[in-house]
Image: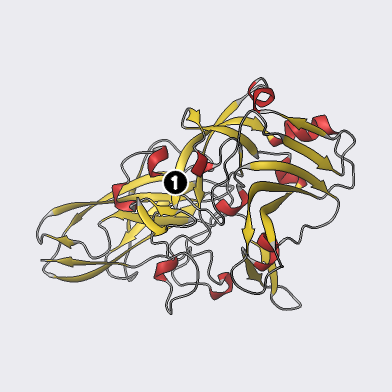
């Protein structure tokens, strides 16, 4: 793993090591805003409260006794690929590996909401983690806060999972033990780790990580307004060759990578070796799954010696095509344009 920050730990998978559909837990990226909390599973409880008829709390034993499901979902940090932004911006300087695809086992969030008798006026569900700390840079509230994000009630009742296992094993501390949310199709900030409270709200949630951080400029008739990040747009990334790699001229090189999108499926990936002037279609794997990435590959007969800029772009089942140029309204997030991978052929 590539260490981007030591305290709190922020670790990135070397994306060039991509070699399978499932990302091993030990190579799945780690994003922490505060120190990893130490949690005693015997005393830990998940509380459900807010705009509901029946507040409740659950132990980990209680959760494991409920009917479980397993889903495969790709989670990408909203700041993944930030190192490609010019000029440099603040934030963890992720390259390509703040993304992973794993199998998550747990209980659908709607199970708890149905049991809690959600009131008709409910609009959002707030997911609060045990992790807490002080914000380093202004604008910021005073003192410690917990990491918390919300999802609309419709999304919460649809496919959000509360997971206690990852790839068939209990969650590790860095991946959210004993319980984390998994919000399919959304950027990783929504998949709150170390869950301790589910709060049903009849008002929009305006917490720090909902409005000040993890927000982007959304265009409307009255001009741009800040909106919380949510769904991932289509994105393809090149795993090999890696940035700066030297490749032999006159050889057959297998370009490969992965592509993903929220709330849809990847239906096409194209590759350019001339910075987007021309494109060739890559071969996709044969196992499309909603909310999980698709691996792809393309043989490249390397040309004469020189410098080349490779790019990949994805198209999804809703007809959306990955943007060639960066949309600045994303701020320091949503780096979803075609990323230039510079290589040398010798």
The quadrant where residue 230 appears: bottom right
User: Image height check: is 128 above or below 96?
Assistant: above
**Residue at position x 39%, y 38% from top?**
24
Pick whichever, 213 or 260, lies toward us. Answer: 213
Task: Give the percent coordinates (x, y) of residue 324.
Answer: 43, 69
Please report the residue visible at 59 percent of the width from the left and 54 percent of the height from the top: 189
Return the x and y of residue 127 as percentages of the image width and height: 70, 47
Report whether residue 23 is seen: no
Question: Which one is nearer the viewer's eye here, 278 or 259?
Answer: 259
Q: Residue at x 50, y 62 (%)?
A: 79
Q: Which residue ends up furthest to the top in the rendered image? A: 65
> SS for tag 1?
strand
In percent of width and height, residue 118 lies at 85, 38
Q: Quadrant of residue 247?
A: bottom left
Image position of 105 with respect to 230: above or below: above
According to the picture, the residue beneath numbered tag 1 turns out to be 100
Instruction: Tell me if 20 is positioned left or right of 337 in this view.
Output: left
């Amino acid at each position: 793993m590539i260490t981007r920050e030591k305290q709190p730990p922020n670790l990135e998978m070397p994306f060039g090591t991509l070699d399978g559909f499932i990302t091993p837990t030990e190579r799945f990226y780690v994003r922490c805003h505060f120190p990893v909390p130490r949690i005693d599973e015997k005393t830990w409880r998940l509380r459900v409260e807010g705009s509901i008829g029946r507040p409740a709390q659950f132990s980990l034993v209680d959760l494991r006794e409920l009917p479980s499901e397993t889903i495969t979902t790709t989670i990408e940090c909203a700041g993944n690929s930030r190192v490609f932004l010019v000029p440099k911006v603040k934030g963890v300087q992720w390259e390509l590996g703040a993304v992973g695809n794993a199998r998550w086992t747990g209980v659908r969030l709607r199970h708890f909401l149905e049991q809690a008798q959600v009131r008709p006026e409910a609009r959002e569900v707030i997911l609060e983690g045990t992790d807490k700390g002080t914000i380093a840079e202004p604008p910021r509230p005073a003192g410690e806060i917990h990491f918390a994000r919300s999802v609309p009630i419709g999304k919460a009742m649809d496919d959000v999972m509360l997971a206690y296992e990852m790839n068939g094993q209990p969650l590790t501390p860095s991946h959210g033990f004993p319980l984390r949310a998994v919000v399919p199709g959304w950027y990783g900030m929504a998949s709150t780790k170390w869950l301790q409270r589910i709060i049903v709200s009849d008002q929009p949630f305006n917490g720090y990580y909902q409005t000040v951080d993890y927000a982007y400029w959304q265009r409307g008739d009255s001009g741009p307004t800040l909106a919380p990040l949510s769904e991932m747009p289509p994105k393809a990334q090149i795993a090999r060759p890696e940035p700066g790699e030297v490749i032999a001229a006159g050889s057959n090189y297998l370009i490969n990578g992965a592509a993903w999108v929220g709330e849809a499926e990847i239906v096409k990936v194209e590759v350019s070796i001339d910075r987007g002037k021309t494109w060739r279609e890559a071969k996709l794997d044969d196992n499309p799954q909603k909310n999980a990435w698709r691996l792809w590959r393309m043989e490249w007969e390397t040309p004469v010696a020189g410098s080349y800029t490779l790019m990949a772009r994805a198209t999804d089942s809703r007809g959306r095509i990955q943007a060639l140029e960066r949309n600045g309204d994303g701020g320091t997030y949503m780096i979803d344009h075609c990323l230039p991978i510079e290589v040398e052929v010798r």
